[in-house]
Image (spheres, helix red, strand yellow):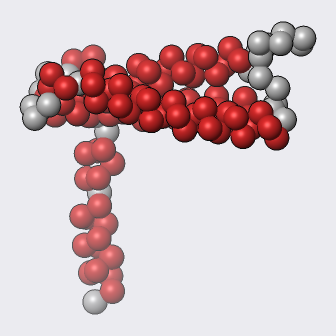
Amino acid sequence: MMPRTIATVVLLLAPLPAAAQPANCANAVSQADMTACAAAGRSNADLRLNQSYARLRKGLSAGGQERLKASQRAWIAFRDLECQFRSNGADGGSAAPMVAATCAADLSRARTADLDRLGKCAEGDLSCPR
């Protein structure tokens, strides 16, 4: 009985990695594929943003870390609201998730560049966080 259960679970889960992978994004035609590609782009941008945030945070004082955390939380709220605004033309349509994910990825990449720049400030630059 146990081997049959394991085999069933393996067979049911086997298609999941393939289903989770978006189609060739350069040639995506269907809305489902374009949405999957946009979601993957957002996930990648979020991952890079989190890495940049962690790198910057390591070099800050305790006070700087608290300010960065507050700033990042406010920025995330801004990003989410901004993307709701930017994607309102697609509300209710099948493209809405793609438009929102693309917006979030674009804004996250810009924020990542800002955090990376702040992490490379020259010593003595008073406009840089410490």
Coordinates of residue 120 in the picture (x, y in percent): 76, 15
Q: With respect to residue 12, does 95 lie above or below? A: above
Q: Position of residue 86 (x, y in %)?
A: 27, 21
Q: Is residue 35 visible?
A: no
- How many marks can you see? 0
Instruction: Write the residue at 81% across / 31% down.
Output: 59
In the picture, measured across the screen, residue 114 lies left or right of residue 33, that is right
Considering the image in quadrants, where does the N terminus appear? bottom left
Q: Is residue 127 left or right of residue 79?
A: right
Residue at figure coordinates x 42%, y 28% from the top left: 79
Q: Which is nearer the eye, 75 or 40?
A: 75
Observer-nearest of 105 and 1: 105
Is residue 101 shown left or right of residue 61?
left
Choose top left, top right, bottom left or bottom right for residue 64: top right
Q: Quadrant of the C terminus?
A: top right
Q: Position of residue 21 (x, y in %)?
A: 31, 39
Q: Quadrant of residue 14?
A: bottom left
Q: Residue 63, relative to residue 1: is it above or below? A: above
**What residue appears at the point 29 percent right and 70 percent down from the top-left corner?**
9
Q: Residue furthest bottom?
A: 1
Which quadrant of the figure has residue 27? top left
